[in-house]
Image (cartoon, rainbow, N blue to C red):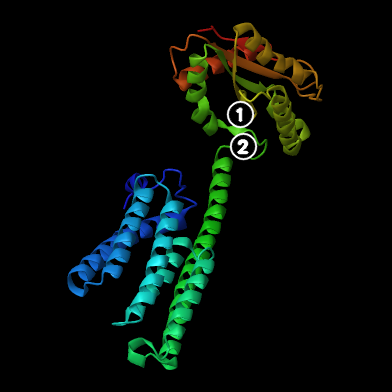
Amino acid sequence: MNKNYIKSLFTDEISYETDIPLIRKQILLSKLLFITSALFLTLAIYHFFLSHDISIVIIDSIAFFAIIMATVALHVFKNFNSAVSISTLTIFVFIIMFTIINKNSDYGLIWTIFFPLFVILTMGYKKSTIFVTIFYSVVFYVSYSGIGVWQNGDWDLTSFFHFALASALLTYTVYSVELSQEHVHKELNALHVVEQQYTDELERLSVTDPLTSLHNRRYLEKVFKAEFYRAKRHSFVMAFFILDIDFFKQYNDTYGHKAGDDVLVKVSSIMREHFKRHEDFIFRLGGEEFGGLITGENEQDVLEFVTALCSEIANEKIEHIGNKNQPILTVSMGVKMTKNFKNDDFNVIYKESDEALYEAKESGRNKAVICTVT
């Protein structure tokens, strides 16, 4: 049975990942209501034409229509709790009345085993406890009162004891099955939660640079089109930039690779502090190259916001005696501004930003070059 078919029968508010026991109960209730309504209708016809017991016919008929109401509550109004309540009360009253009237004629007590089965399987082992307790209190009292009277006096204490013991063992067995089912589901659900956590962590790691904790190139390509069309939809300006640390090889040669890693972390921290709006995306593209995807309402504000990063990093005055221009750490940037949104090809925008970066390096470094705005 596929999910769409289940949703056509039951409420759409169910979460199929977390409410599997409820789905199981709903499917079971649907089948039990069908079987029970057919049973009550059959019994009403049987007792009317064959046994001519009008009192039983009336009980059967009332029970049949009550079960139809429960079916309507489940299938039409999508109300599982109402369907369970109506059907539970109906079966409870029917079996109690039938037991009192039938007095175990033709082994009529056999029908009493149906109620605990129905209630436990549809309500669960916790909620059904009070209903089953009340039911057996009444049934056992009525059947105990029938000792020496029912079946022309053949219903004795031994008969009552066998009936009570069999009923208790059957109920305990059903309780145990339902309890084990719920425990298994809880264990499976706990495993699912752990599995989902591992999956989420793997997904996060797959799009995160392990050194700087920034998003990586893979994540950039993943979010680019979404941001492109968001900016287009709101008539924003979008800027993509590539940032490169000037003379980074010389920095590693002078201070060592550990210090080089520390500088990469420092630059990423400055970028994170600078671009901290929820609509800003910054990335480590690889090596000493970083990138960013920024949107704003107008071209000038976005441009000033992006290019200010060069000065901000230089103002940290991180020592870099290998820098041929000045003995501090500086960066160069290539920026691509987009406002007409005619081309959503990421490779084209990346290439233009990379060309602007090359121009920034060739023209003295420690600056941002903006390619033609389109």
Q: Name the kind of residue labelled 1 in the image.
A: Phe
Q: Name the kind of residue labelled 2 in the image.
A: Asp
Residue 373 versus residue 309 in the image, above or below? above
Q: Secondary structure at mark 1?
A: strand
Measured as percent of width and height from the top left, residue 12 is found at: 42, 43
Which residue position is annotated with label 1? Answer: 283
Looking at the image, which residue sits at the far left? 49
Which residue position is annotated with label 2? Answer: 209
> Toward the viewer: 271 or 329?
271
> Toward the viewer: 40 or 126?
40
At a point 43% along the width and 82% down the height, the residue shown is: 143
Mark yes or no: residue 273 visible: yes
N-terminal-most mark, 1 or 2:
2
Mark yes or no: residue 154 visible: no
At a point 55% along the width and 18% down the height, the residue shown is: 354
- How crowded pointer 1 is (Cα within 10 Å; few <14, some 14-19, many 20+) is rated as many
Q: Is residue 63 left or right of residue 17?
A: left
Q: Is residue 184 left or right of residue 5?
A: right
Residue 51 versus residue 289 in the image, above or below? below
Residue 300 versus residue 73 in the image, above or below? above
Q: Secondary structure at mark 2?
A: loop
Residue 64 versus residue 77 in the image, above or below? below
- How crowded pointer 2 is (Cα within 10 Å; few <14, some 14-19, many 20+) is rated as some
Residue 338: numbered disc: none
Q: Is residue 223 left or right of residue 4?
A: right
| Contact check, label 1 and label 2, Cβ < 8 Å | yes
Measured as percent of width and height from the top left, residue 195 is found at: 53, 53
Image quarter for residue 59? bottom left
At a point 45% along the width and 79% down the height, the residue shown is: 142
At a point 75% along the width and 36% down the height, the residue shown is: 256
Instruction: Give the CA separation, mark 1 to mark 2.
Output: 8 Å
Measured as percent of width and height from the top left, residue 78 is found at: 40, 46
